[in-house]
Structures are given as structure tokens and as C-alpha cells.
Image (cartoon, rainbow, N blue to C red):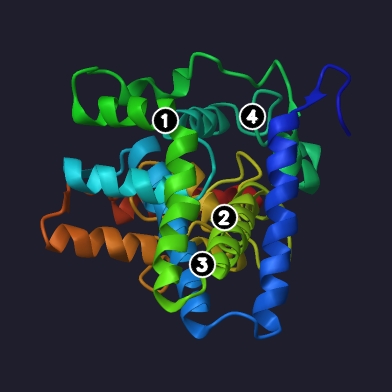
Amino acid sequence: MIKRKERIDLPNALLMLVIHVLGFYGFYKAFTGAYQRETIILGVVMYCVSGLGVTIGYHRYFTHRSFKCGEVLQTVLAICGTIAIENSIKSWVSDHVMHHAKVDTAKDPYNATRGFWWSHIGWILFKDPDREDPMYSGAEHLMDNPASWIARLVEFQHKFYYPLVGFFVWGVPMLIASLWGDIWGGAIFAGFSARLMTWHGTFCINSLAHWKHWGSSQPYSRANTAQDSLFASLPTFGEGYHNYHHTFPRDYRNGPLWYNFDPSKWIIYWLSLASLSWDLIRVPREKIEAARIATLAEAG
């Protein structure tokens, strides 16, 4: 249900419409064999790059600072996140910090108590003055030192966000696909269709991972609607262990158990072996077990 004070966000709504129409057209062309195999592979690669840019970059690094890395990797993560077209780092981080601070309340940007549709996509289509943060206060931790590389990187990406999106989302795939003579396939399938996969994967964390459904659980806390969901983890490179994440948001792992499907944690760990990431934040096993036992006791 849309509140009276909310108004449609026309730019977002138009962007959603265009990318959905062209994205589904790209899927249709792919299923009918219109694209070369190389174009399909390029689309899958772009989906993986953008998805990991959100999970490892926007989420675990820029928002929660669950590990440290150097300027080169910071830049790579910013580029990969830009390809997802999920807004600038400053905006995305600010929204997500507010989500954790005000989860399941009117201040939560993707408040799950308003229903699956709202938390999945409705919050993007409608503006609500109560949720708007024009000062991006949730991203202040990135701007503590204006002279630092990360602060300059975040400001640059925010200022030139749309040109960067145009270049990396469509320019680069078109250039690559031109190597085998399928420039428009690169633009449509790798540019639009791959975005739909990234988008709805991310949207599932806001909706499906806050909705009690078959296979979901709350093993670590019942303080809010966040659920652990293997199903939501599959398209998001491990983000679906959301009950754990809301309980221990700074852990570089979303799936703490060795068998949890969390490719993002594996990549962060592998990067640490190559000295490209360090100071990985890992919640002690005893603290995790204590949370699990307390939740079991609460459930009776």
C-alpha cells in the first residue's frame, strides 16, 4: 500500500521500465539462438562482475568495512559496483546503513513489514520524505578523511556516476562484443539482461531474505525479520545468510559455516592469501554459538 505522502520517482520508474523491457527482449533473443556463444558468456561474466561488485564492494567493503584493501582493489570494486546500476557508492551505503539502524521501521528504506512487493522493488519506484537522506549521513565513515583515496574515489564516482554507468555498462560490452561482430548483442544482453539478473538477485535480499518462506530460518536472532535463505544466496554470491548478517554485520562472511554457499567470503579470503586484502573481521565461534543458543532458548 502506497502512503499518501509518497510520490512516484519518475527517473527510477523510467529506468526500471526501459531496462526490464530491453532486458527481457535480450533473454528472448538469447533463448531463440540469436546471439553468439561469446555474447552469452560475456553477459554471464558481466552479471558475475556486477554482482560481486555489490556483495564484496558496495556491501562488505564500503558499507561494513569488514576487511581492508589497497587503492587498486578499492577502485576495482567501485567499477564493478558501478556496473550493477544500483546507484552510487555514497547513496547505496547510506541506504544500507539506515536499513541496519532502522530495520523494519518507517525509516528503513526497504521496510519488509510493508510487504514483499514494497521491499523488493516498490521502495525504488516511490519517494518517501521520511526515508530520504540528502546528506548521505550513512556514508560519513567513507568521508572521514577527505584527502584519502577512498573519499576521493567515492566523491568522483558519485559526481560522474551516470557517465561511468554509460561507459562500463554499455560502452565496454559493446566494444568487447564488436570483436566477434555482435555489438548490439553486447549492448542488449550483456548490458540490459545481465542487469536484470543482478538487480533481482539484490532485490531478493531486501525481500525474500526478510520473508519467512520454505527453507528460511532465524538461527541467530529473532530481533527483526531477517532470515537465512540458501535460495537467496545462490544468485547473490552468498548474501542470503541474512539473519547471521543482521546479527553480526561486520563479519566478512555472510555464511559463517564452511559449507554455506558464500563465494564472496571465499574470494575475500583468497585475496588475503595474496596480500590484496587484510584485517578480515571474523566473529569468534564462541560468540556465534552463544547467539544460536540464546535464540533457541527464546524460541522455547
4 vs 3, front mark: 3
Q: Which label's residue is closer to the chain start, 2 or 1?
A: 1
Element assignment for label 4:
loop
For the N terminus, the quadrant is top right
Q: Which label's residue is closer to the chain start, 2 or 3?
A: 3
Element assignment for label 2:
helix
Residue type indicated by callout 1? Phe
Q: Which residue is mark 4?
A: 108
Figure quadrant of residue 223: top right
> Does residue 72 lie above or below 52 as drawn?
above
Residue pushed farthest left? 275
Residue type indicated by callout 3? Ile
> Does residue 215 lie above or below 272 as drawn?
below
Q: How many marks?
A: 4
Residue type indicated by callout 2? Leu
> Does residue 98 lie above or below 43 as drawn?
above
| Residue at mark 4 to residue at mark 3: CA–CA distance | 41 Å
Q: Nearer the viewer, residue 64 or 50?
A: 50
| Residue at mark 4 to residue at mark 1: CA–CA distance | 27 Å
| Residue at mark 2 to residue at mark 4: CA–CA distance | 27 Å
Q: Residues within 10 Å of mark 1 (few under 14, many from 20)?
A: few
Residue 285, visible in the rendered structure: yes
Q: Which residue is mark 2?
A: 296
Element assignment for label 1:
loop
4 vs 1, front mark: 1
Residue type indicated by callout 4? Asp
Q: Which label's residue is closer to the chain start, 4 or 3?
A: 4
Q: Which residue is mark 1?
A: 160
Q: Which label's residue is closer to the chain start, 1 or 3?
A: 1
Identify the mark at residue 183; answer none if there is no mark: 3
Q: Nearer the viewer, residue 68 or 21?
A: 21
| Residue at mark 2 to residue at mark 1: CA–CA distance | 48 Å
